[in-house]
Image: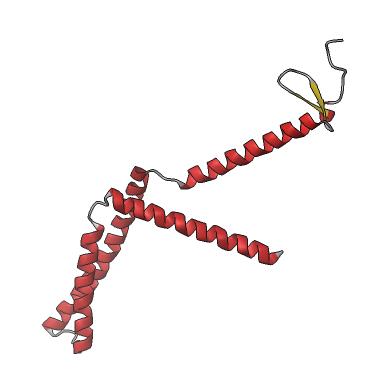
Amino acid sequence: KDRPTKMRWTNRIINPRMRSISRTSKMYHRWMTLLIIVLVVLKTVECQGSRTLDLEATRTEMIESRNRRAKELEKMLNVAKEQLKQHKSGQKLLDDAEKKKLERQIDMFERKMEHLLKEPDDKEVKRVLHREQERDERVLARRAQQEKEEL
């Protein structure tokens, strides 16, 4: 008599005290609600954890990105310097506006490369993380708005 009557497993669940719970009982609904809440909380934590990056990983990623951009800028700088060199040697003359534009570009490229090749500090890394989180929030809000409009 201590053992519960046999029922199909689809008609009951077993609580920690090994008592069967009918699908229509309040306890069943409480357990299922608790299970759903736990699953939602775990999924939310998992999603937040995937977007929350630590400072060192973000710093490494930033340095790699900056190095790639610095290489591209170096190519652009070399092209601009070569054009200016050709103008000064008389091979390919530029008008005054083009010459001033090239000189400004060379100055801008050099300053940008100098900035890119410096190590980012914690403040800058945190600023980038904050900006990414704000962007993610805007994207999620936009998607939610689009889903509302579709319904």
Q: Which residue is found at the position 71% from the left and 37% from the top?
A: 33
* Residue 148 spot, x, y in % from top left: 67, 63
Going by the image, does 45 lie left or right of 1?
Answer: left
**Quarter placement of the C terminus:** bottom right
Q: Which residue is found at the position 88% from the left and 18% from the top?
A: 5
Question: In the rendered image, which quarter is residue 11 located in?
Answer: top right
Q: Which residue is found at the position 54% from the left and 41% from the top?
A: 45
Question: In the rendered image, which quarter is residue 103 located in?
Answer: bottom left
Question: In the rendered image, which quarter is residue 112 located in?
Answer: bottom left
Farthest residue in the top direction? 1
Going by the image, does 149 lie left or right of 49?
Answer: right
Q: Nearer the viewer, residue 71 or 33?
A: 33
123, above or below 82, in the image: above
* Residue 8 spot, x, y in % from top left: 86, 25
Going by the image, does 140 lie left or right of 15?
Answer: left
Q: Which residue is found at the position 57% from the left and 43% from the top?
A: 44
* Residue 106 spot, x, y in % from top left: 20, 73
